[in-house]
Image (cartoon, rainbow, N blue to C red):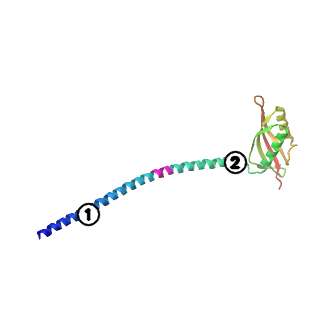
Amino acid sequence: MKTNKKVWLIVGIGVFVIVLAVLFSTYSQQAGERGQLEDNLSTAQALVSKLTTQKGDLEDRLAQAESLLDTSQAEFPDSVESIEYGEDLFDIADDCDVVLTSLRPSQPTDKEAGGATYSVSSFVVVVKGDIGDILDFVDALRAGEDFQLPWSAELKAVRINYGGEGDTATINLDIYAYKGE
């Protein structure tokens, strides 16, 4: 029986060594996986931080773009009349040999006078040319003879800059058009 105890002892030690080897192998494998998962987690956290920053930047850009869109839409009236008025203003400028360099309309408003409703659009017009041609343009606006549409203009202010590289005039005017009923 002494041999039997030795064999059992050797088998027990062998099984113990095998169990320890399997446990060490499993622990080493899990430690490697844990290290890989920690690396993946830190990479994901860095990516989340970067994406959060990008999201904030994109939201800021979106807000700026929406604000710019609102500002741009406010500069361009919805009314088609302002486009038609612009065509007449360009034709008058061409007839008077001046160059219309800027045309800024405002939103049309409605005004009532004597029971009639009029659409009133304010414009800032900048023209460039000889002083005589600029004065002809101002007179044509005031007289309204060259208007192709049924409207009239009231000059609010005329500022003429002469000399230097050319004569220019900045003209503020209101254009009245009958709206009808």
User: Magenta residues?
Assistant: 46-51
Q: Hey, what amino acid is under mark 1?
A: Val
Q: Quick one: SS at disc 2?
A: helix
Q: Mark 1 = which residue? A: 19
Of all residues shown, which one is farthest toward the right?
145
Q: Which residue does the image show at 84% across and 41% down from the upper left?
A: 92
Residue 181, position in %: x, y? 83, 56
Residue 162, position in %: x, y? 78, 30
How many numbered marks, from 0 up? 2
In this rendering, position of residue 177 left or right of residue 48: right
Mark 1 Cα shell of 10 Å, populated few (<14), some (14-19), many (≥20): few
Q: Quick one: SS at disc 1?
A: helix
Residue 50 magenta-highlighted: yes
Q: Mark 2 = which residue? A: 74
Of all residues shown, which one is farthest toward the top?
163
Choose top left, top right, bottom left or bottom right for residue 103: top right
